[in-house]
Image (cartoon, rainbow, N blue to C red):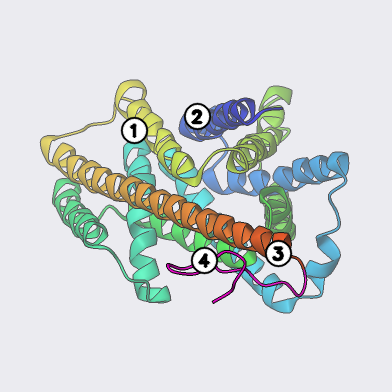
Amino acid sequence: MDSRSEQRIGLLNGFAAYGMWGLVPLFWPLLEPSGAGEILAHRMVWSLGVVLIALAVMRRWSWAGPLLRQPRKLGLITVAAATITVNWGVYIWAVNTGHVVEASLGYFINPLVTIAMGVLLLKERLRPAQWAAVGIGFAAVLVLTLGYGRPPWISLCLAFSFATYGLVKKKLNLGGLESLAAETAIQFLPALGYLLWLSSRGGATFGGEGAGHAALLAATGVVTALPLVCFGAAAIRVPLSTLGLLQYLAPVLQFLLGILYFHEAMPAERWAGFALVWAALSLLTWDALRTARRSRTVLREAAVAAASVAAEAAVEAADEADRGPGRTAVPSPGPGSKPGTHA
């Protein structure tokens, strides 16, 4: 398969992954009357089942043994499982209590939070445009705090939990399915214990609301794993810069659903806050594209220079080979020299 077809498949998978993440607010209300805690526990339990089936089909088990022998990585996976639990739980609660727009804001500001964490935790140096974007994002949070009458804690919780999750995942260096399998394996027993406790108290809805409701709760595993599979297929086929642009598709769709489908209020001060966030993201995207373009130019120039040096070396080697071993070049006759004589 040629590279163009590979890129097309990658783009389709990228659109599918971020499209599903963007449309997922339509799914969680279907699970009512289940509460956010019960939905979250079912998501953990059924996700493990779906991922284990996928790994069995693909026969991808070689990573598990070495992982179990690395306590540091197991600790990182536990942190990742804890942060994504917070992220999932807050998101489900936000959608089912009418805060879809504020939830979408969390994923809009996530890149800005990731950059800020890079500075604070990893001592990374920012370019001027990145500093400006972070400053504009901070101003947006202040404006939205005035607009909501409180800090946008749902957005901040989602952004910080997902940024922390991303940071831990970067250190883990595990594939998407493998990482999700390890994380949900850690989540499984607490989640199952919670569901059993809920059932013992008569508060569980699984099985008590009909087969359709039970099937929807079981489908939370597919809803979790399928976008991740598509994302993995996209990540290996399209450039990182393209994937970075595609990530905005999910919060854009969530924002539009909040406004047009769930009819959430958007007074002027919230529009102002969102406009500042979008301005910061536009600046960040422009800077990232410009930096990527410069990097490609530098790499291209370096490749040309290396090719030129290699060509010169090859010519010199060919000249040496033509002279043969133990032979030296005969100088050209100088002015005044006679034929048959050497200077």
Dot 4 or dot 3: first in sequence order is 3
Disc sitting over residue 333 in the figure: 4
Tags 4 and 1 in contact by the CB under 8 Å rule? Answer: no
Q: Residue 104 sits in which quadrant?
A: top left
User: Nearest the camera: 296 or 233?
Assistant: 296
Q: Is residue 67 above or below residue 203?
A: below
Name the side, left or right, on which 331 lies relative to 46: left
Dot 4 or dot 2: first in sequence order is 2
Dot 3 or dot 1: first in sequence order is 1
Disc sitting over residue 323 in the figure: 3
Which residue is rendered at x = 38% and y = 67% of the image?
117
Q: Is residue 341 above or below residue 185?
A: below
Disc 3 element: helix
Which of discs 4 and 1 lies nearer the camera? The answer is 4
Disc sitting over residue 255 in the figure: 1
Q: Position of residue 242 (x, y in %)?
A: 46, 39
Name the side, left or right, on which 101 lies relative to 223: left
Count residues near mark 4 (Cα–Cα under 10 Å), then give few for <14, some for 14-19, many for 20+. few
Q: Position of residue 74 (x, y in %)?
A: 70, 71
Q: Residue 170 sits in which quadrant?
A: bottom right
Tags 2 and 3 in contact by the CB under 8 Å rule? Answer: no
Q: Position of residue 324 (x, y in %)?
A: 76, 66
Residue receiving disc 2: 19
**Label 4 vs label 3: CA separation?**
18 Å
Dot 4 or dot 1: first in sequence order is 1
Q: Evaluate whether residue 258 shows in this view.
A: yes
Q: Is residue 24 magenta?
A: no
The boundaries of the magenta stretch are 325-343
Disc sitting over residue 146 in the figure: none
